Amino acid sequence: MAAKQVLLTADGFKKLQDELENLKTVRRQENKEAIKRARSFGDLSENSEYDEAKEEQAYIERRIAELEGMLVNVKIIDDEVVDTDIVTVGSTVKIKCLDDGEEDIYAIVGSTESNPLEGKISDECPVGKALLSHKVGEVVNIEVPDGLASYEILAIER
């Protein structure tokens, strides 16, 4: 089975690279010291510090493998080639809810970078998926928890 392509902005790519570097150089070393320190406490069968350090080691190694797998399959979204005529991954979209008049701005990103609290929504989430390929002035009906909501696309930027 082919690995899923990971869509990232240049900033998202840099953050993942930085996280990987930190895990490999800093966190691994800190964890190694924690394991060594916990071993010095004696009996490992009842040593909660040792168990915690080993769990942390497993997490670090899993995350390193996960990040390396993602970074091998990355496609970086080039801001310069993001189309402002239609909504695509990499677009920043200003929308207006036609039900209550509320306006929102969302950056459409790959699922790896998604963070709704920062206004970054995935191209795979219902809102992001519904907005893709639409133009300024178009009304998009989106299935939300309360039912169907209508949004007008006010602007598309890079």
Image (tube, helix red, strand yellow):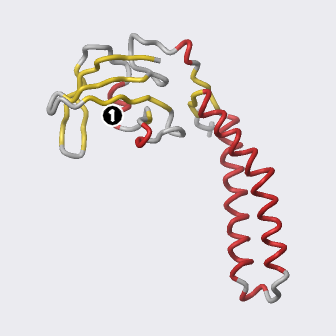
Left or right, 129 with respect to 73, comes to left
Element at label 1: helix
Left or right, 89 with respect to 44, comes to left
Residue drawn where x is 71% and y is 50% of the image? 64
Residue drawn where x is 25% and y is 16% of the image? 138
The residue labelled by disc 1 is 127
Which residue lies most toward the top here?
Answer: 85
Residue drawn where x is 33% and y is 17% of the image? 155
Sort mark 1 into few (<14), some (14-19) or many (20+) by Cα contacts within 10 Å.
Answer: some
**Relative height, residue 149 to residue 27 (above, below):** above
Image location (x, y in percent) of residue 36 = 84, 73
- Amino acid type at mark 1: Val
Image location (x, y in percent) of residue 133 = 37, 19
**Quarter of the image where one finds residue 10:** top right
**Relative height, residue 45 to residue 64 (above, below):** below
Left or right, 152 with respect to 109, comes to left
Which residue lies most toward the left here?
Answer: 99
Q: Which of 18 and 70 is in front in this view?
A: 18
Image location (x, y in percent) of residue 145 = 24, 46
In the rendered image, the quadrant that contains the N terminus is top right
Image location (x, y in percent) of residue 143 = 24, 37
- How many numbered discs sit on the rendered protein? 1
**Quarter of the image where one finds residue 55:** bottom right
